[in-house]
Image (tube, grey):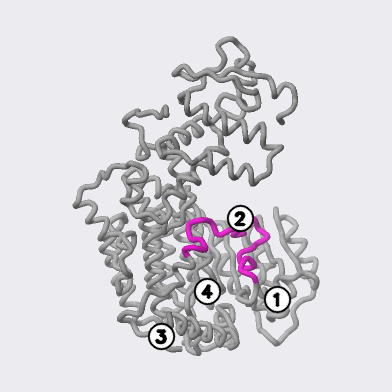
Amino acid sequence: MAGSSKEMEKVLLRTADGGSFVVSRCVAAAMVAISCEVEAGEGEREGGILVPNVTRPVLAKILRFLHIHVEMAPSLYPITLERFDKEFLNVSVDFLYHILLAAYHLKIVSLRDLVCQKVADMMKGKSIDEIRTTFNIPNEYTAEEMAKITKKYPWIFDQQLDDEKGISVEKDKNIENEGTSKGKHKRTADELGSVEKDNHIENKKGTNREEEIHVESKEGASTGKDKQIEDKEEREGARRRRHSE
Amino acid sequence: MGENKSVGKRWEDMETDVLVKIFKQLNMIELGPVSQVCRSWCLACSDPLIWNALDFGLLKSNFIQTRASPYIWVDDWSDRRLTQLLRVAMGISRGNVACMIFHFNLYMKDEHLTYISERSPHLKRLVMPAWNRITKNGICQAIRRWSELESMTMPTIAHPPYIMEEIGKNCKNFSELKIMGSFDAQFATAIAAHLPNLKVLSLRCSRVAKEAILYLLNCLEHLEVLNIAHCMLFDGPMLHPGRRQSLRELDHTVHEKAARLREFYHCQSLSCIACQRMIADEGLMRWYRYEECFWRQDEISSLDLGDYGKLFDAKCETNARERPPLRRDREIRL
């Protein structure tokens, strides 16, 4: 915990591109990837610890985060930390990329998770093209491939629900047993016509038990008349409201 | 500003581990466009870590009860919506779903079952408490495709032997079963005959014939965990509602036989809420009356369903509930 004298000892951290930082031991140890070296006292030696996979500006940013979250956190309100986090991640997408990669390699779980959440939030509600623009990702699909995707996953492009007659197997190419599944699908459709025979609730030999199970499925499924009426009213109400909008 | 302008390493080249952690924050509707941004993202979107548990516990059918078999009628729109959602999930997951959970008021048809069983060949766990609209053939075919199935939660059905046989034949790693509803000697016989390696069984909040329990405790050598908490127990092998009183307490024979189990859950207490509800509902728990998390609970930790997860969250549920504008389909008159 920050505060004990050992924790407050200073260690030297360096980056491959010439950056050099003096920070508290506890901050350095928060980077789990180098915590062994920190514990072994390497940070106090003249050369300090060379932090891999990170450049000067990125490490500076990360150390700022750790300073707040490790050293200052005990004396800060949670809301202050939240505000800090929000402002902290208000950077370009490129910089975010480097922070995320560094947090991942340096094994700083809290920062990594924070950036992951931020990046995820940046994807919500966007179309494919908008996401590509946001993250500077070039479109690697040909026009043909995009047309296939549009056909295969129409719901991605916000198209209306097709009036599907059951699930069409032909559209999906990504199943291994596609060849057999068509046949099976056909058989199922035929069988649906004679569902009484195959129904797991056999009502040929009407037994007491059969009644019992029927009661079960009724009850287990749901409701007494009351709920049905409630549901009905709710639906009527909703329908009325929609029509009046 | 000091940003690196290094060429080559960009978001499309981000480590898969990291991408998976990002994508785990998104629900399946949000994952749709993300999965088509580029090939590496498409692969990351189908990662098993994301599809470890596909929990549709917030999704219910629009249904009414009917007097004739199958006693449930679901409107067309519900079926089509379910189809749509399953397409999204199966499309993005590319065969990597390990566990699927459905609500007890989600009544799917054979075609839905066929669809998901074809596209999730590595499924290990299925929670499907409503079989009203599924045929014997439908469920058997699905079981045949799920050779890696290890755990299933199912409702009580009239004639269990066929399904137990199918599981026994096709699912070599099957070890965990939960039954919701009632449990009698016929069920027990079927399990003993076809699932001799069963390790975990939960019957919580069901009507149970005591003889059935004793029979299983005798026959299932590998049984390690048994949950009969909050069950309404009856003497004898069969269950006949209204003809006899339920047992007030469990006698020593069951306790003795259960002593060898690693875990044995039993509760018959008038001060226990679940037990009180069983009494109020006369042994057939009406889950819809109680809080949503109640049916998802189980004293056995591997069977407890916990939170809903991110894939189908409240936002998806709200979106799914809004009916599309009136088109060619008839308005359903109730």
Mark 3 or mark 1: which comes first in sequence? 1
Mark 1: secondary structure = helix
Tell me the mark number nearer the camera, choosing from 2 and 3: 3
x%, y% of residue A236? 48, 85
Q: Relative to the observer, which residue lies in front, A181 or B136?
A: A181
Mark 2 or mark 1: which comes first in sequence? 1
Q: Quadrant of the N terminus of chain B?
A: top left
Check whether the beta carbons of the residues at disc 1 and disc 4 lie within 8 A of each other: no
Question: Which of the labelled discs sits on residue B278, or is there none?
Answer: 1
Tell me the mark number nearer the camera, choosing from 1 and 4: 4
Give the quarter of the image for residue B108: bottom left
- The answer to whether residue A202 is visible is no
The residue carrying mark 4 is B105
Three-letter amino acid code of the residue under disc 4 = Asn
Q: Determine the chain carrying the residue at label 2.
A: B
**Separation of marks 2 and 3 at Cα, in angstroms:** 41 Å
Three-letter amino acid code of the residue under disc 1 = Met
> Which residues are drawn in magenta?
B291-316
